[in-house]
């Protein structure tokens, strides 16, 4: 079977902190006036599995396709490591208000507490940010469990957090264990392990439409947190035309920024992994076996591992893509 690049219907998530930018800036099909915080672009998470949009597999779930063509879609190396599990989750996030202060478990803690194989290592690419927008990544200084627990009990969580002013193009690696939150006014792309495990530490005492506060997970968070201060949290990629810039590379995912003014190519079969492209600027043309897919800003496409050379062209000026595959390590 000669698999072609695959597009999927976005899975839209209503969030108390969400807004409308996923529709106005990324052209997602928002209806009603509910606050939409996330668009899950490609997901194998149980209960939220992506469905193919268009082509010969239109209407088929990603998990069903992987059952039929595991090596052809995932790649032999990825299949050996993860079996038929799709190991990553791709999102766009619109924070109209601050998200909760939170932390995610690593693989070992996810298995221990939830019998789930995937913890949640993630990374963020800032697509746009309103003036003065900030996010939290890490502590201001070295912490300990006892010291942080005391600050929580005294209602001083905010005093422990390291705030970062952000602008378009900033990249943050958020490994499991790092305390973090996305601040209001930020629109970003998120690439993460295939997991929805989150431990909320603090939620600004917000209530939902029924007057109820959201659940916190303090004891779990104490066990998950990395209390060590780090010297570097942010990456600022170059934006030279027709280049590939490394953003984040770890044992879970390898993410590069492609800046395209003319043409480049990707050969998934040579990488031994599927490739996912997220369009973050401009419009890109994806050409494979005589078939053309347009990828405007805010769209995502999966290139199966069996695909040979795929041509990528910028349309009407410069375009930028996030290119993700599974690391060899």
Image: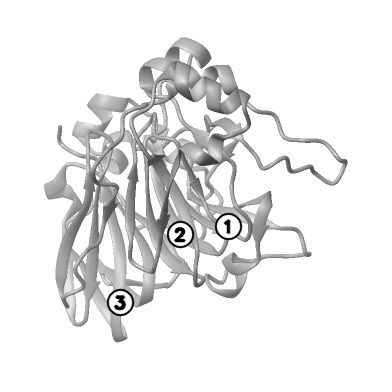
Nearer the N terminus, badge 2 or badge 1? 1
SS for dot 1: strand
Query: What residue occupies the far left of the structure in this picture?
Result: 270
Mark 3–mark 1 CB contact (< 8 Å): no
SS for dot 2: strand
Tell me which corner region of the image, top left, top right, bottom left or bottom right, holds residue 141. top left
Q: Is residue 62 above or below residue 144?
A: below
Mark 2–mark 1 CB contact (< 8 Å): yes
Give the distance between the C-alpha atoms of the residues marked 2 and 1, in whole angstroms: 9 Å
Towards the viewer: 259 or 105: 105
Mark 1 neighbour density, 10 Å: few (under 14) some (14–19) many (20 or more) = many
Q: Residue 323 carries which label?
A: none
User: Which is more foreground, mark 3 or mark 2?
Assistant: 2
**What residue is pinned by disc 2?**
188
**What residue is pinned by disc 3?**
319
Question: Residue 19 location, x and y as percent?
Answer: 66, 62
Q: Is residue 31 above or below residue 9?
A: below
Q: Is residue 41 visible?
A: yes
Could you tell me which residue is drawn at 11 percent across and 48 percent down? 270
Q: Can residue 221 be seen in this view?
A: no
SS for dot 3: strand
Mark 2 neighbour density, 10 Å: few (under 14) some (14–19) many (20 or more) = many
Give the distance between the C-alpha atoms of the residues marked 3 and 2, in whole angstroms: 16 Å
Give the distance between the C-alpha atoms of the residues marked 3 and 1, in whole angstroms: 24 Å
Could you tell me which residue is drawn at 56 percent across and 51 percent down? 59
């Amino acid at each position: 079977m000669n698999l072609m690049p695959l597009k999927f219907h976005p899975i839209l998530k209503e969030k108390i902190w969400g807004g409308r930018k996923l529709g106005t800036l990324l052209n997602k099909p928002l209806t009603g006036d509910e606050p939409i915080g996330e668009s899950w672009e490609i997901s194998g998470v149980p209960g939220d599995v992506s469905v193919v949009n268009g082509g010969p597999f239109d209407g088929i779930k990603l998990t069903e396709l992987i059952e039929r063509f595991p090596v052809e879609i995932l790649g032999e190396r990825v299949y050996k490591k993860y079996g038929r599990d799709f190991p990553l989750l791709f999102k766009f996030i619109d924070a109209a208000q601050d998200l909760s202060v939170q932390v995610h478990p690593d693989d070992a803690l996810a298995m221990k507490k939830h019998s789930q194989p995937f913890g949640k290592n993630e990374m963020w690419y800032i697509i746009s940010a309103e003036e003065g927008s900030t996010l939290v990544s890490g502590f201001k200084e070295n912490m300990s469990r006892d010291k942080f627990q005391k600050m929580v009990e005294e209602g001083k969580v905010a005093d422990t957090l390291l705030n970062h002013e952000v602008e378009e193009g900033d990249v943050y690696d958020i490994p499991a264990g790092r305390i973090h939150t996305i601040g209001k006014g930020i629109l970003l792309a998120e690439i993460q392990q295939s997991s929805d495990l989150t431990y909320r530490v603090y939620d600004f005492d917000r209530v939902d439409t029924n007057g109820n506060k959201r659940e916190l997970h303090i004891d779990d968070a104490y066990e998950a947190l990395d209390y060590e201060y780090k010297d570097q949290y942010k990456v600022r990629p170059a934006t030279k035309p027709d280049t590939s810039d490394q953003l984040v590379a770890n044992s879970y995912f390898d993410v590069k920024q492609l800046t395209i003014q003319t043409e480049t190519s990707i050969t998934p079969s040579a990488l031994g992994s599927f490739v996912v492209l997220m369009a973050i600027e401009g419009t890109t043309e994806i050409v494979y076996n005589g078939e053309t897919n347009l990828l405007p800003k805010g769209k995502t496409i999966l290139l199966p591992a069996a695909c040979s050379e795929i041509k990528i062209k910028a349309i009407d000026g410069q375009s930028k893509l996030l290119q993700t595959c599974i690391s060899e390590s």
